[in-house]
Image: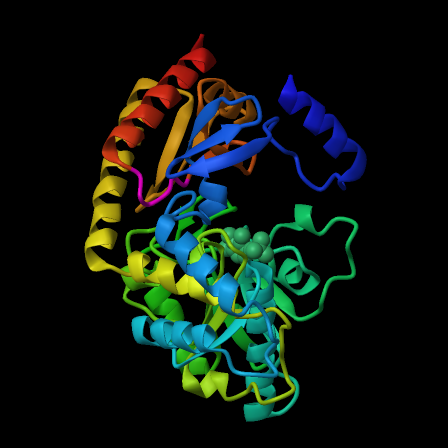
Amino acid sequence: MVNQRWMEKADRVIMHTYGRQPLVLVKGEGCRVWDEAGKTYLDFVAGLAVCNLGHAHPAVARAAAAQLDKLVHVSNLYYTTPQIELAEDLVRLTFADRVFFCNSGAEAIEAAIKLSRRWAATRFGPGRHRIVCMANSFHGRTLGALSATGQDKFWQGFEPLLPGFAFVPFNDLESLKAAVDDSVCAVMLEPIQGEGGVKPADPDFLPAVRRLCNERSVLLVFDEVQTGLGRTGRLFAHERFGVAPDIMAIAKALANGLPMGALLAKEEAAQAFVPGTHASTFGGGPVIAAAARAALEILSNSDFLASVREKGEYLGEQLRRLQNRFPAIQEVRGVGLMWGFDLNTEGAPLVAACRQRGLLVNCTQNTVIRLLPPLTIERAELDEGLAILTAALETLST
Ligand SMILES: *Cc1c(COP(=O)(O)O)cnc(C)c1O
């Protein structure tokens, strides 16, 4: 097997940080990817909510290619036009007044932690540096982001973590009220916990958190690294809840597969960063910023977002049908094209059964099957994926 040979090589030279699927992928187009042996797969993972416009989107590819010929990198010692234009787009499309660019979700979270602490230090003096986060959250793997992640399985062997984080159960307002005292500068949460198993905030929770943050003068930070950029059928998931944060971390789909993260903030919070306080060598580089602008133009289109909501409702309906048919499926949760369902058994065999039949799906939290297809998916492709998922579920129950 061609795939096998590459996997053996990888096993010798790449660090063992990933439990990977046994697939070597060489090509992607739209909602499909090809492996080394030439087999194609319908991709309901989309690089973990990254390729929201599908693989090899021509507008993104053209924008990046054109910029590659012009100017690739000069550092943030200088201004570059794609970065400025992208920031203007993001400010126009969101609650935010200013943007800081970086290269990943974890880095955007690091920036959010630093900005929150510095805002409080500037405004109130020392002693107000703690951040209240949610149990079961996921904010990334760098030491700061890891310290904000409310799952101790990710901490093992890496302690001591960064001090100054407290955790309360997600959707538990009373616990949050008790935790937000004078030592706290910010509350940080994902509007829908992604890695944690596709768990949405209760409709009343985010407005109540917003009010609490206002009352106690603490910043509200949303991690929309996974939920942002059209994934939920709105440009950002918080729009569904009618609540805006003070600071928001985004990344994943921002440049449709090229690495980019960003921190967005209201003016008052953003003022806490002054020259010399934070930086990224690659952040907001011209090629990635040009690609992100092209992606954002499509992702923010209202007809496009309406089509995501429509396809999402259809996918949700079909998953609930499967739930009625297969007792292995417990709860079905999701919105837009971000869906998950709990199995009463380990998810890995179902992921493998889908893969063998030509469908890529992801499993998180051991028993939650997560579906994150490209937002550009056609109805016929959704049906094709659902048919494969159904066939794979049949193997579980026999
Ligand atoms: C993926 C993810 C991160 C981390 O992003 P990286 O780019 O892998 O560092 C942070 N927060 C959420 C909600 C995520 O889904």
Total marks drawn? 0
Question: Left or right of 48: which side holds 117?
Answer: right
The residue positioned 37% from the left and 71% from the top of the image is: 90
Tell me: residue 357, above or below residue 107: above
The residue positioned 40% from the left and 55% from the top of the image is: 62
Foreground of the two, 211 or 21? 21
Tell me: residue 12, above or below residue 202: above
The residue positioned 56% from the left and 21% from the top of the image is: 37
Q: Quadrant of the C terminus?
A: top left
Q: Quadrant of the N terminus?
A: top right
Q: Position of residue 167 (x, y in %)?
A: 58, 61
Question: What predominant SS class does the magenta segment belong to?
Answer: loop
Q: Position of residue 344 (x, y in %)?
A: 48, 25
Most extreme residue toward the front is: 69
Determine if the magenta segment contains residue 37. no
Q: Is residue 345 visible?
A: yes
Q: Which quadrant of the view contains residue 137?
A: bottom right
Ligand 1, what quadrant?
Answer: bottom right
Determine if the magenta segment contains residue 375. yes
Q: Position of residue 312 (x, y in %)?
A: 27, 42
The residue positioned 43% from the left and 53% from the top of the image is: 61
Question: Left or right of 20: which side holds 233?
Answer: left
Foreground of the two, 58 or 242? 58
Q: Position of residue 291 (x, y in %)?
A: 43, 60
Magenta residues, as a range? Answer: 372-377
